[in-house]
Image (cartoon, helix red, strand yellow):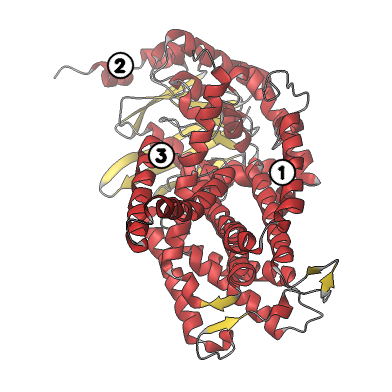
């Protein structure tokens, strides 16, 4: 047994709040990072472009929504709208600023800040309203952003079709061209960029959660009156949550358009994407960062996997459309069953499993 | 010693209902002041007026030498008021440790960027907060439950955690709303010990709403009695016990 918690004694308060307190965990993290950075980029282009990169982008948006909804308790249906701000922001920054000034990573971060500011504006009602009413107000953000970019074609560079393909040279933002046989405009460098942003921002979110800001967020979620009596400024805390959350969504939107789809298209950011992100969050577990990632991976991959399995088994007997519809239905039933069994989602499932293993083989 | 808190002619109305009618009271520095009275007498409303959760229509609150008509709960916290609630207002989704740590939020100077990056001030402050919190945890003897989610704790312990959360902010005045309701005798004795010990050691002024007369008469220096939003008694426990109005309010009068 290598994996156990006994014998891990902390001797310092700072060590008590480590993200990975166990030595075994730390080794696994290093191995995991090596795997992600060295092995995954060498897998097929299809794997990166159709599975890994979209999950990274969407998962980041789920983490962003988690900060707002799971941790600060402010319901939001505007995630796709804020992603849209990020995508269009990145596009315009890359397009309008000189090449030597702007590179893709920088543009992603700055447009994240744009999205954050838009989020703060639409978060203002949160100071006075909560719950479903706030949900409606963030839905307004979703539709406003959509209308805005649809009406002002300046932001899509007056493209009549409303869709702009990302010029490939934008991916080679340092102008390297070809490095050690790796095409800088290909998918591996894009994946590395997405992965680095995601790891950095996930670490940031995790740090926030275990410090004063995160505790203030949670206290506003659990009891806002008690929070204000403790001296926490509730309006400020809510707006900060909106800013950080929408920053994450903005960066995720930029990544989704630039690193995954490869074009800037308003149609990607319709309200159903907001719903998908909310589902990912709920299935993963509100309030848990690792849960957000599990939810994103599950919701993104499960239908694909399911259709594939269905196709392999019944493909000969029925036509593909039938198999796909049936697998969608089974998938829906599965999710309902999961949420009835464990309303806390995957994060809670993981926690109970860990607790059971800890007690095993004597459950009492 | 002078008055730390002075409430003057406060009237509080909700629509047509008068919760508090023209009440004045003084709390001296360093005393344990108990506010008693039947249900609906306006005791909790009084605490809410003092720390700014409710704004009275008439009257002023003088605290620490500053007279104000209104104060926001946040300003009250900054000026050193801490309180607990009648129906426990802990943060249910957080652990005991996290709950008490929120009580330190006013001492934290680092911003969210520093905390997110986990650098510099954010780290040293986190350690300092943790030290202060651990002192309170050991004082309240709740070391064994520090990582338990508060929702899983029994009522008595939750009340204790809430007291800890109030104490860790190093307040000048502690407002306790029924700290001993729903507790058994042993838990009440523990709670009384904690309140008295803080009061005697640090001279912390405490205003406490309590229904248990035994406890009130034992630990309070000063008792204020409210009934139907009016003050009907104010004095030492002995004086209160002899006060005819108070006896009438509690036992009823024959007509």
Q: Answer with left or right where residue A173 lies relative to residue A244.
A: right
Indicate the secondary structure of the residue bearing disc 1: helix
Q: Answer with left or right where residue A150 lies relative to residue A53.
A: left
Establish if A52 lies above or below B195: below
- Check if mark 2 and mark 1 are on a common chain: no
**Mark 3 = which residue?**
A343
**Could you give the CA–CA distance between mark 2 and mark 3, rounded to whole angstroms?**
53 Å
**Could you give the CA–CA distance between mark 1 and mark 3, rounded to whole angstroms?**
29 Å
| For the residues bearing labels 2 and 1, Cβ distance under 8 angstroms | no
Q: Mark 2 belongs to which subunit?
A: B
Percent x, y of residue A307: 42, 55
**Could you give the CA–CA distance between mark 2 and mark 1, rounded to whole angstroms?**
73 Å
Q: Mark 3 belongs to which subunit?
A: A
Crowding near the residue tagged with mark 3, few <14, some 14–19, many ≥20 C-alpha atoms within 10 Å: some
Q: Earlier in the sequence, mark 1 or mark 3?
A: 1
Crowding near the residue tagged with mark 2, few <14, some 14–19, many ≥20 C-alpha atoms within 10 Å: few
Establish if A191 lies above or below B40: below
Report the front residue among A186 and B68: A186
Q: Quadrant of residue B3?
A: top right
**Mark 1 = which residue?**
A32
Foreground tag (2 vs 3): 3
């Amino acid at each position: 047994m290598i994996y156990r918690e006994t014998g891990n004694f902390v001797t310092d308060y700072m060590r008590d709040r480590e993200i990975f307190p166990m030595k075994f965990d730390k080794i696994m993290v290093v191995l995991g990072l090596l795997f992600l950075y060295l092995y995954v980029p060498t897998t097929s282009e299809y794997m990166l472009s159709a599975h890994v990169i979209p999950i990274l982008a969407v998962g980041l948006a789920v983490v962003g929504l988690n900060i707002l909804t799971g941790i600060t308790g402010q319901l939001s249906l505007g995630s796709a709208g804020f992603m849209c701000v990020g995508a269009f922001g990145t596009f315009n920054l890359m397009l309008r600023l000189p090449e030597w000034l702007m590179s893709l990573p920088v543009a992603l971060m700055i447009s994240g800040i744009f999205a954050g500011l838009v989020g703060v504006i639409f978060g203002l009602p949160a100071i006075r309203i909560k719950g479903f009413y706030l949900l409606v107000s963030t839905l307004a953000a979703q539709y406003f952003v959509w209308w805005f970019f649809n009406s002002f074609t300046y932001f899509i560079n007056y493209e009549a079709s409303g869709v702009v393909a990302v010029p490939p040279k934008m991916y080679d933002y340092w102008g390297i061209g070809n490095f050690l046989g790796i095409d800088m405009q290909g998918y591996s460098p894009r994946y590395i960029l997405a992965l680095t942003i995601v790891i950095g921002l996930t670490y940031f979110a995790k740090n926030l959660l275990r410090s004063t800001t995160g505790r203030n967020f949670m206290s506003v979620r659990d009891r806002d009156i008690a929070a204000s009596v403790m001296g926490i400024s509730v309006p400020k805390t809510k707006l900060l949550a909106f800013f950080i959350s929408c920053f994450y969504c903005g960066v995720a939107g930029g990544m989704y358009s630039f690193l995954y789809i490869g074009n800037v298209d308003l149609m990607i950011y319709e309200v159903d994407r907001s719903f998908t992100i909310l589902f990912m969050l709920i299935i993963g577990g509100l309030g848990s960062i690792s849960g957000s990632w599990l939810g994103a991976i599950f919701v993104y991959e499960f239908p694909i996997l399911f259709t594939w399995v269905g196709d392999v088994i019944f493909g000969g007997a029925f036509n593909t459309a039938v198999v796909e519809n049936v697998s969608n239905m089974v998938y829906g039933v599965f999710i309902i069953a999961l949420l009835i069994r464990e309303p806390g989602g995957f994060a809670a499932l993981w926690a109970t499993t860990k607790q059971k293993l800890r007690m095993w083989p004597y459950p009492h | 010693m002078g008055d730390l808190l002075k409430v003057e002619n406060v009237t509080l109305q909700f629509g047509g209902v008068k919760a508090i009618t023209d009440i004045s009271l003084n709390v001296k520095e360093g005393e344990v002041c108990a506010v008693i009275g039947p249900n609906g007498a306006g005791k909790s409303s009084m605490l809410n007026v003092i720390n700014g959760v409710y704004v009275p229509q008439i009257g002023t609150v003088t605290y620490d030498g500053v007279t104000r008509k209104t104060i926001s709960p946040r300003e009250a916290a900054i000026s050193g008021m801490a309180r607990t609630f009648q129906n426990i207002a802990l943060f249910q989704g957080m652990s005991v440790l996290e709950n008490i740590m929120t009580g330190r939020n006013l001492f934290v100077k680092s911003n969210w960027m520093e905390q997110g990056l986990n650098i510099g001030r954010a780290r040293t402050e986190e350690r300092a907060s943790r030290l202060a919190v651990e002192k309170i945890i050991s004082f309240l003897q709740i070391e064994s439950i520090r990582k338990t989610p508060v929702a899983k704790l029994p009522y008595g312990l939750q009340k204790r955690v809430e007291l800890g959360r109030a104490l860790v902010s190093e307040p000048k005045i502690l407002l306790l709303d029924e700290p001993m309701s729903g507790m058994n005798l042993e838990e009440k004795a523990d709670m009384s010990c904690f309140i008295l010990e803080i009061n005697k050691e640090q001279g912390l002024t405490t205003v406490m709403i309590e229904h248990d007369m035994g406890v009130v008469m034992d630990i309070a220096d000063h008792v204020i009695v409210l009934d139907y939003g009016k003050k009907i008694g104010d004095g030492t426990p002995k004086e209160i016990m002899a006060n005819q109005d108070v006896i009438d309010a509690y036992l009823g009068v024959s007509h």
